[in-house]
Image (cartoon, rainbow, N blue to C red):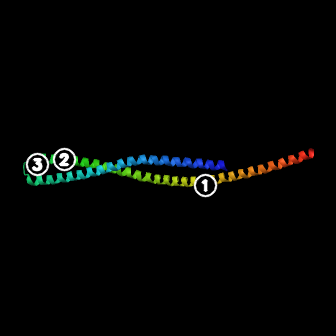
Amino acid sequence: EMSSHVDNLSLNVQMALASVDALEAEREHSATTLQTLETLEASHAALASSNAALEAAHVAALSREREQESTAAEQEQQMEALRCEMSSHVDNLSLNVQMALASVDALEAEREHSATTLQTLETLEASHAALASSNAALEAAHVAALSREREQESTAAEQEQQMEALRCEMSSHVD
């Protein structure tokens, strides 16, 4: 019975250690998640900046178009420059959107990982409960063993007294 309780206790301790290892991995993963969130914030800021720059470029282009009346060649050059500027802003905007989507994917993976972490925590709680139960059973078995040991010692002492009395009686008969 004691061996069985010790085996159960050992198994529960191994489960608890595995849960602690999983929590340590989760702590390390949290650092990566924080970095992902910071990247997402940076990409959002860059996206807002690109939008503002794009709006400013658009307003400036409209203003230049209204204010300037020049030759067709000059206007074509200005439009080409504007197309290049707009293309550059669109490229930056596309890059920022891709970064934002990657961050969203990372957050989705983190959400799934959180479910696993919750299950790990529930397993840890169950192993702690089982460990407490095993400790109680082990303590009860230990108390019972001590009680049996005391009873056996008492019985052995009584038997020794009876044997001594019998030896005395036999010795008397032999005399």
Q: Left or right: where does residue 119 sit relative to residue 84? A: right
Label at residue 136? 1
Q: For the residues carrying marks 1 and 2, which lies nearer the camera in this image?
A: 1
Q: Which residue is mark 2?
A: 85
Find residue 6 and report its horizontal and vertical position in percent.
Answer: 62, 48
| Number of other residues with Cα within 10 Å of mark 3, as a class: few under 14, some 14 to 19, many 20 or more | some
Mark sitting earlier along the chain (1/3): 3
Tell me what residue is drawn at x 14 percent, y 54 percent.
Answer: 62
Q: Residue at x 19, y 54 (%)?
A: 55
* In this picture, residue 28 sits left or right of residue 88: right
For the point 68% across and 53% down, the residue is 144
| Quadrant in which the C terminus appears | top right
Nearer the N terminus, badge 2 or badge 3?
3
The amino acid pointed to by label 2 is Glu
Q: Nearer the viewer, residue 132 or 59?
A: 132
Name the residue beneath numbered marker 3: 75
Q: Amino acid at mark 1?
A: Ala
Of residues 106 and 120, which is closer to you in this image?
A: 120
Q: Nearer the viewer, mark 2 or mark 3?
A: 2
Query: Residue at (49%, 48%) from the top-left corner?
Result: 20
Label 2 secondary element: helix
Q: Residues within 10 Å of mark 2 (few under 14, many from 20)?
A: some
Cα separation, mark 2 vs mark 3, equals: 15 Å
Amino acid tagged 3: Gln
> Cβ–Cβ below 8 Å for labels 1 and 2?
no
How far, Cα to Cα, is label 1 from label 3? 90 Å
Q: Secondary structure at mark 3?
A: helix
Drawn side of residue 127 relative to residue 147, left or right: left
* Callout in the foreground (1, 3): 1
Instruction: Say whether disc 1 or disc 2 marks the residue closer to the N-terminus.
Output: 2
Q: Nearer the viewer, residue 70 or 165?
A: 165
